[in-house]
Image: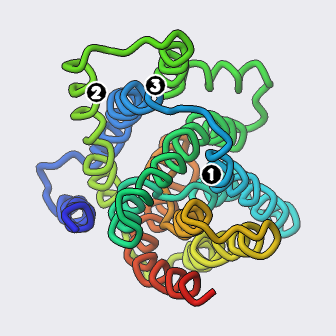
Amino acid sequence: MENIILLFLCLLLGVLLQRVKQFPSNAHQSLNQFVIYVSLPALALYYIPKITLSLSLLYPLGVAWLGFGLSFIFFYTLGTYFKWSKKLIGCLILTGGLGNTSFVGFPIIEALYGPEGLKTAIIVDQPGSFVVVTTLGILVAASFSRGNLSPSEIILKIIKFPPFIAFFIALLCTAFSFEFPSALQNTFLKIGNTVSPVALVAVGLQLKIDTRSKHWRFLTLGLFFKLLLMPAFFLLFYHFILKQNGLDSNVSIMEAAMAPMITGAIVASTYGLKPKLSSMMVGVGIPLSLLTTAIWYFILQSL
C-alpha cells in the first residue's frame, strides 16, 4: 500500500512543481538522466546477479519479451498503414510494450498472491522487463528517434546505454559466481530504489492534461493495447492454448496487465519520442490500471 501512495504522491508532486516559477522548466530532463545514469545501473548490479536460470523462467519471461514483440508488430503495422510519424510509432511501441512490473506490479501481486507470487513477479521484471528496456527498448528508441541510423550507430547507442553496461557487468558477475560485498549491495539497492520516485516526479513535470490535445486518440489506443489486448493475448496463449493454470502463469498474466513502464516513458522522452504522450501514458495509465487489473484478477479466479 505504501508503494501505491508514494507513486501517486510523486506524480502529484511533479504536477504541482510545474506551477513553481523557481523550479527549472527543463528539470525533468535532469531527473531523466539521473534515472538512466545512476538509478537503473544500480538496480541491475543488485538484482541481475541473483537470478538463477531455469525452465520455470519461461512463462514470466514471455510476458516481457513476447509482449514487446507484440507491441512492435501492432503499432508498427498500424503506423505504417496510417502513415504515422516514426516518433509516434516509437513512443507507442515503448509505452505499450513495456509494463510497470515492479513499482506497481510488486505490491499488487504480493497482495493478491503472497510471497510466492512475488518471486514470479521478480522474474517478470528483472530478466524480463528490465533487460528488454535496456536492449530492445533502446534499439527501438534509437531507430525511431532521428532519421535513419546505421546499424553500427544503433549498436553503439545500445553499448553506451548506462543500464546496459551495468547489465553486462552483472551478467559477468553471474557467470563467474562473483558477489559484491553486502554493504555495496545494500548501497546499490538504496540508490536503485530512487528509480520510481524520481522518474514519477519527472513524468509529473511533463504531464499536461489538455482536453483538446491530438494525443487523446493515441493515448486511448495505447492504453487499450496495454491494459486490455496484451493481457487478453497472454490469457489466451497461456491458459487456453498451453493449458497452464498455475501460480506462474496467473502471475505472468496479471503482470502483463500492469500500467505502462515508467522507465519506458523516460527512454521515449529522452530520445524525443513524443514526450507529452509518453507522460500521459504513464500518468493516466497507472490509476486506470488499478481498475483493469482488478477485472483481470476476477476473470482469472473464475476460470
Picture coordinates of residue 256 (x, y %)?
A: 58, 64
Q: Which element is circle 3 on?
A: helix
Name the amino acid type tagged 1: Ala
Mark 2, mark 3: which one is toward the viewer? 3
Quarter of the picture containing the C terminus is: bottom right
Picture coordinates of residue 222 (x, y %)?
A: 62, 70
Tell me the distance, in whole angstroms, between the alpha carbons under discs 1 and 3: 19 Å
Name the amino acid type tagged 2: Phe
Q: Is residue 5 left or right of residue 81?
A: left
CB under 8 Å between discs 1 and 2: no
Q: Give the vertical position of 41 relative to 211 (above or below).
A: above
Name the amino acid type tagged 3: Pro
Q: Nearer the viewer, residue 111 or 68?
A: 111
Tell me the distance, in whole angstroms, between the alpha carbons under discs 1 and 2: 24 Å
The residue located at (57%, 69%) in the rendering is: 250
2 or 3: tag closer to the N-terminus: 3
Picture coordinates of residue 282 (x, y %)?
A: 44, 64
Question: Residue 291 sits in which quadrant?
Answer: bottom left
Q: Residue furthest bottom?
A: 302
Quarter of the picture containing the N terminus is: bottom left
Q: Residues within 10 Å of mark 2 (few under 14, many from 20)?
A: many
| Residue at the disc numbered 1 | 64
Q: Which element is circle 1 on?
A: helix
Q: Nearer the viewer, residue 98 or 244?
A: 244
The residue located at (46%, 21%) in the rendering is: 166
| Residue at the disc numbered 3 | 49
The residue located at (37%, 33%) in the rendering is: 43
Q: Which element is circle 2 on?
A: helix
| Residue at the disc numbered 2 | 188
Q: Residues within 10 Å of mark 3 (few under 14, many from 20)?
A: many
